[in-house]
Amino acid sequence: MTHLPHLLNECMELVRSAAEDKKIVLLSEISPAQPPVPVDVDGLHQAVLNLLVNAIEAVQPETGVVTLSCEFDPATQETMIEVQDNGVGMDKATQENLFKPFYSTKGQRGTGLGLAVTKKI
């Protein structure tokens, strides 16, 4: 069982310097009052980091905002983790290829594996 706020705050700390270098706002909306959940800690850590890094790269310097939120719903006993950014979004072609291995919009800077691995996790 894992306490998600601790794991998610650790992910935020790991990307904080990248956000600061780009002069973007990194927001955390993680309630500390959540029950422990059974998760693959290493897998979830990698998936959240992939999403945060992609979000940081997707926003404009100085005006970008990336938010990591985590919410537990007692009625359904489900936890939702969400990464949001205020980037320009994706065109239809990118959306259709998003999770295909080796598909990247980053040119030489990307392997095209981040979201494919994240989806698998």
Image: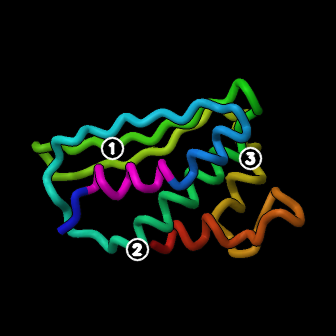
Residue assigned mark 1 = 70
Q: Check disc 1 and give the amino acid type.
A: Cys
Residues drawn in magenta: 4-13
In the rendered view, tell whether residue 94 sits above or below residue 71: below
Whether residues under marks 2 and 1 lie with C-beta atoms below 8 angstroms apart, the answer is: no
The residue pinned by badge 3 equals 92
What is the crowding at mark 3: few (fewer than 14 residues within 10 Å), some, or many (at least 20)?
A: few
Left/right placement of residue 79 relative to residue 95 reads: left
Residue shown at 76% from the left, 33% from the top: 60
Q: Tag 1 or tag 3, which sits nearer the N-term?
A: 1
Residue 7: % across, % down = 34, 58
Q: What residue sits right under mark 2 in the picture?
A: 42
Query: Who's the residue at 48% across and 58% down the image?
Result: 48
Magenta stretch contains residue 65:
no
Residue 47, given in percent of the width and then of the height, sits at 49, 64
Mark toward the start of the polypeptide (2 vs 3) = 2
5 in the magenta segment? yes
Q: Nearer the viewer, mark 2 or mark 1?
A: 2
Q: Quadrant of the N terminus?
A: bottom left
